[in-house]
Amino acid sequence: MAAVVAKAQACLVAARGRVEQREADCQTGGLPGARRVGLNRPLGRSLAPAAALKRAPRRSGAARCSAAPQAPSAAAEVSEREGASGKGFGVFRLTYDLKEEESARRKWSKTIRVAVSGAAGMISNHFLFKLASGEVFGPNQPVAINMLGSERSKEALEGVAMELEDSLFPLLREVTISIDARDAFKDVDWALLIGAKPRGPGMERADLLDINGQIFAEQGRALNDVANPNVKVIVVGNPCNTNALICLKNAPKLNPRNFHALTKLDENRAKCQLALKAGVFYDKISNMTIWGNHSTTMVPDFVNARILGFPATDVIRDRKWLEEQFTPQVQTRGGALIKKWGRSSAASTAVSLVDAIRALTTPTAPGDWFSSGVYTKGNTYGIDDDLIFSLPCRSKGDGDYEVVPGLIVDEYLRARIKKTEDELLAEKKCVSHLIGLENGYCDLPEGDTMLPGEQ
């Protein structure tokens, strides 16, 4: 007890000493030690402008001082900052002076600005929190999120922003909400185009191509006008290959190599099925390629895939299973999922989008590759050079990639790659009016190859 009393008395003496020092500062016309503002606020908001940290000028004559510390003004405590569109949401409009943050920020990279369309949808709802947490770009990479939606989804977007706000992600520097693509895409480094109109009852696939094509044409023009010139674009909204091509063709100032259609989910599904059949964990599956369109004509490549480092066909010797069960299981996995719980995949799509970004921002393991729908110009596989077509890729982790050459394409693969290529060429003709081509007509191959996500 005596020790506790002695400690309390020592604290009281120290406090009195600080008050006396403050009075002495005032008597000499000096300023007391400036009280840092915002030190009790959570780490993770950007520093206030330097002007907010300047000391007040000395007054002429005697300085008036109080022994009690002066409360900082509201202007010094917090300053407002307009977002890219002037619509920063809630707490993300605020910047704090945080002394503790100064050392943390030395480890951080420059903030990456990411636009997400369809931001009120289920896929985005899963993805945005992964993005804000650092799971996508890493633990030292701050991000700003521009959410794009429609007038109808505006309140839902605000709800998503409120949840992001309440999650207190240190790396999340800014959130903006917009229903205008030019606002949402201003200066963005990444554009993740998730939103697309779903296919309604009785709607022909050609109609869906046209309706969504107009959306992606407008978004391409917006990216062309206002985005970072090196912006990376990943299209998720179906039919994603042709939507990505439309977006690319309407953004002539941007590098065509920076446009991708998401086929990483198909790759992940293929790895899962091979792992189940081989009786190994899925991290033992590598070198998986998805060729072609993100539709039921996609070609999951077991010929070049490897299991435990060995050719998949050496581990799974049942060629009939590989051709007649594995391939259709991957092609129709989305439909099987819908039958189980009545909705299309959202969480796994969000995870695969994270994987797709990390595949471009993390060096590919030696000898391995990943799948992405990329622009085919200059490809070595004889595929038409003006499509977005899923191919095997590898990256140095700088956001760029190269198509892996020299894969085995046997007769089985060649026939199926040709079928998915023909489908993409037919889709391209359907949207010729949106990509600057003349004399286009819509003559899609027989049979409906739509994926469940288009419904």
Image (spheres, grey):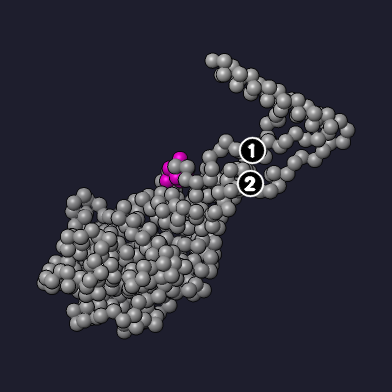
Between residue 420 and residue 284, name the one nearer to us: 284
* Dot 2 alpha-carbon crowd within 10 angstroms: few under 14, some 14 to 19, many 20 or more: many
The residue lying at 25 percent from left, 65 percent from top is 285
**Is most of the magenta stretch helix, strand or loop?**
helix
Label located before the other in sequence (1 or 2)? 1
Q: Is residue 372 left or right of residue 34?
A: left
Marks 1,2: beta carbons within 8 A: yes
Between residue 28 and residue 342, name the one nearer to us: 28
Between residue 370 and residue 129, name the one nearer to us: 370
Q: Which residue is mark 2?
A: 48
Asked if residue 56 is positioned above or below residue 296 in the image, the reply reads: above
Residue 82: in magenta span = no
Residue 302 appears in the rendering: no
**Residue 305 rendering spot, x and y as whole percentages:** 24, 71
The residue lying at 28 percent from left, 55 percent from top is 345
Q: Amino acid at mark 2?
A: Ala
**Residue 57 rendering spot, x and y as whole percentages:** 80, 40
Q: Quadrant of the C terminus?
A: bottom left
Q: Which residue range is magenta in the image?
A: 160-166
Between residue 125 and residue 159, name the one nearer to us: 125
Q: Residue 37: which disc?
A: 1
